[in-house]
Image: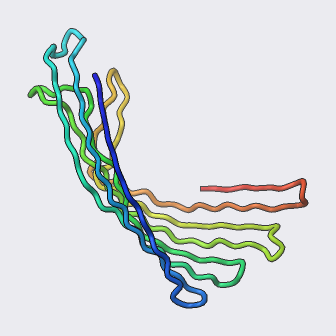
Amino acid sequence: STAEETAYAGFGQVSWHIAPLWSVTGGLRLSHDKYGISTVGSGLGDSQELEQAEDSGNHVSWRFDMEYAASENVLAYAGVSTGYKSGGFSTTVLPDGELDDYEPEDLMAFETGVKAQSADHRLTLNASAFYYDFQNLQVVTQGVVTVVDNAAKAEIYGLDLDGFFAFSDELTLSAGVV
């Protein structure tokens, strides 16, 4: 089997300081991908016919973030963004003779958090909460063959906390929990 994927993307973003303590950022990503596969079975139950398939797609992803600088050492933020992962084909040939394909994966992501640092920069604390809403999440199954399928929907959410403390120039402690 041979597989080939070509992908191109362009991304840009702009930030605007709307007030002394507030800023917003918006971004846009334009993606194009083309993927294809050729396969000939080599096992006893495989088709000895050459099977080929290809597909391509365009996608637009975006982001919007807002920041509030509560002080010189404390920053609060919130953002929403979309994401994309291209579809493709596995080398499995279906009973109808077609190659097994999987759909592109789409994501809507939300995050909010705080980044804080002591005045002497010896202590840093970061905290964020996130929620990811997937459509067509790509799920890889390992067995005799590797297969990629799409889950109809999936959600991931959680907290991410980390910190850093410098006891001295030579000794620091860092820790985190998710």
Q: Residue shown at 35%/41% (left/top)?
A: 139
Q: Nearer the viewer, residue 134 or 34?
A: 34
Vertical placement of 118 versus 2: above or below? below
Q: Nearer the viewer, residue 75 or 174?
A: 75
Vertical placement of 22 versus 172: above or below? below
Q: Residue shown at 61%/73% (left/top)?
A: 114
Is residue 112 toward the left or the right of residue 154 in the image?
A: right
x, y (%) of residue 109? 41, 63
Query: For the N terminus, which image quadrant?
Result: top left
x, y (%) of residue 56? 22, 46
Q: Residue shown at 76%/61% (left/top)?
A: 164
Is residue 17 toward the left or the right of residue 166 in the image?
A: left
Is the image coloured rainbow, by chain, by secondary structure, or in one colour?
rainbow
Q: Residue shown at 34%/62% (left/top)?
A: 61
Query: For the C terminus, which image quadrant?
Result: bottom right
Q: Quadrant of residue 71?
A: bottom right
Q: Quadrant of residue 107?
A: bottom left
Is residue 76 toward the left or the right of residue 152 in the image?
A: right
Vertical placement of 79 versus 155: above or below? below
Q: Quadrant of residue 156?
A: bottom left
x, y (%) of residue 129? 53, 66
